Image (cartoon, rainbow, N blue to C red):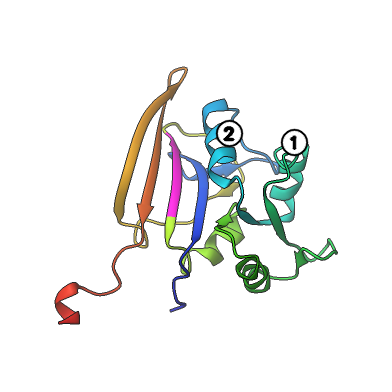
Amino acid sequence: MEPVVPGVKIIVAVARNRVIGRDGRLPWKIPEDWNHFLESTRGGSLVLGRRCFEELVDTGALKDGTRRVFIVSTTRSGPDCFPDFPSALEAAKRAGRTIWICGGERIYAEAMPVADELILTLVDADFDGDTRFPEWSGEFTNLHSERASRHGSIPLYFRVYRRRERFSRAECV
C-alpha cells in the first residue's frame, strides 16, 4: 500500500449515485458548492486531468492566480503537464503547498490511497452522468465535520473525512 502523504486532499462534489460528471462537465450548477471549492483550494496546488482543467479554465476559476495547476494528460504539453498521476503528484509536492486532487474519475482513483483527507460535498439526489467517484467509504471512515445546506429542493452535505487508522493504537503499545 502506498504511504499517505500529509497535505494531500481530495475535493469532490458527488451525487448520491456517485455521479460526478457528464460530458466533461459537472451535471449541476450549485453556487454554494462552487464557492466552497474556490475558497478551499485558494493558494493550493491542484492536480487534475485535462478535462477538469479545461472546465476550470472555462469557468474562470483560475483567473485569481492563487492556485498552481498540475495537469495529468497525454495530449497536452508544457511545464506543468505530466503523463501520469505519480509524476504530477511529485511535482505538486515540490511546490510546497497543500495539494488538492480535483478529478476526474481516474485521478481520484489513483489518489485514494495517498490522500489524507476527503473534502466531499454530497449532492443528495441522483443524476445522470458518465463519470463516477470511486468507492471511498473503506478508506475515509472518520467524519471530522459536516454542515448541511440546500440547493432548492436538493439537500447538500459538506463533509470532511479523515483517513481511517491503518492500525489500532493498541498495536502501537
Q: Which residue is mark 2?
A: 34
Spatial separation of the CA atoms under disc 2 and disc 1: 12 Å
- Dot 2, how many residues are within 10 Å of its Cα: few (below 14), some (14-19), or many (20+)? few
Q: Which residue is mark 1?
A: 60
Q: Quadrant of residue 173?
A: bottom left
Q: Quadrant of residue 74?
A: bottom right
- Residue 99 drawn at (x, y percent): 57, 59
Please report contact status of discs 2 and 1: CB closer than 8 Å, yes or no.
no
Residue at figure coordinates x 52%, y 46% from the top left: 12
Task: Tell me, yes or no, whether the highlighted magenta stretch contains residue 120.
Answer: yes
**Highlighted magenta segment, given as a residue range:** 118-123
- Residue 136 drawn at (x, y percent): 41, 57
Q: Secondary structure at mark 1?
A: loop
Magenta span: predominant SS is strand
* 39 shown above or below 68: above
Q: Quadrant of the N terminus?
A: bottom left
- Residue 13 drawn at (x, y percent): 51, 41
